[in-house]
Image: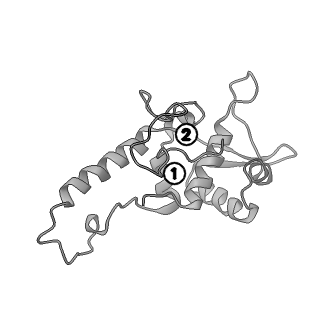
């Protein structure tokens, strides 16, 4: 099963929160780790570590003072979901045959090339979605992100690949 780690999930939630415009003004907010943790029911110690990692990776900057906390350091239109996942979790690898690891079936494998195409498609999709796009109703460029209520999902028991944010 393809699944985001909790750290990647929390990173995207925090960045999305910080990318939301404040009121009718279009400037971005600053928020404390505690504020974000409480808003999304995330354990504060884990979120604090995630926010520090995002800061070290250049996605966030620390804001001092009474209304301090964290704010996005770069334009959210130019931060991709893939960048964030890689910064928090390292490379996105669908199967071990895409690394230097050898597999017992490598000589007779018939799915390596199709899986490589799936892998590349997933990376391309994640790279095409910006943090700003996560603040919209449909984060996938060109539409097709969150299906309308009651729509048939061809994979039983699965949600949208981008169903990562609390409702």
Q: Report the disc number at residue 84.
A: 1
Residue at (67, 41) in percent of width and height: 17
- Marks counted in the figure total 2
Q: Is residue 123 visible?
A: yes
Q: Judge from the rendering whether residue 117 lies leftward or rightward of residue 28; answer left or right.
A: left
What is the crowding at mark 1: few (fewer than 14 residues within 10 Å), some, or many (at least 20)? many
Above or below, 129 against 50 in this view is above
State the image coordinates of residue 135 (x, y, percent, origin top left).
60, 34
The residue singled out by tag 2 in the image is 131
Q: Which residue is nearer to you in this view: 27 or 5?
A: 5
Above or below, 14 against 5 in this view is above
State the image coordinates of residue 66 (x, y, percent, origin top left).
88, 45
Residue at (55, 56) in percent of width and height: 8
Q: Report the disc number at residue 48.
A: none
Label whose residue precedes the other's in the sequence (1 or 2): 1
What is the crowding at mark 2: few (fewer than 14 residues within 10 Å), some, or many (at least 20)? many
Q: Judge from the rendering whether residue 4 lies leftward or rightward of residue 54; answer left or right.
A: left
Q: Judge from the rendering whether residue 30 lies leftward or rightward of residue 16; answer left or right.
A: right
State the image coordinates of residue 141 (x, y, percent, origin top left).
43, 30
């Amino acid at each position: 099963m393809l699944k985001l780690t909790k750290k990647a999930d929390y990173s995207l939630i925090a960045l999305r929160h910080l990318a939301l415009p404040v009121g009718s003004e279009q400037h971005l907010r600053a928020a404390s780790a505690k504020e974000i943790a409480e808003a999304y029911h995330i354990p504060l110690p884990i979120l604090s570590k995630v926010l520090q990692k995002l800061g070290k990776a250049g996605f966030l900057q620390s804001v001092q003072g009474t209304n301090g906390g964290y704010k996005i350091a770069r334009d959210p239109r130019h931060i991709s979901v893939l960048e964030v996942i890689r910064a928090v979790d390292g490379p996105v690898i669908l199967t071990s045959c895409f690394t230097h690891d050898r597999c017992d079936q490598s000589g007779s494998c018939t799915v390596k090339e199709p899986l490589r195409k799936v892998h590349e498609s997933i990376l391309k999709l994640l790279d095409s979605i910006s943090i700003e796009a996560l603040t919209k109703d449909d984060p996938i460029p060109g539409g097709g992100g969150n299906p309308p209520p009651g729509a048939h999902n061809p994979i039983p028991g699965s949600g949208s690949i981008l169903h990562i944010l609390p409702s």
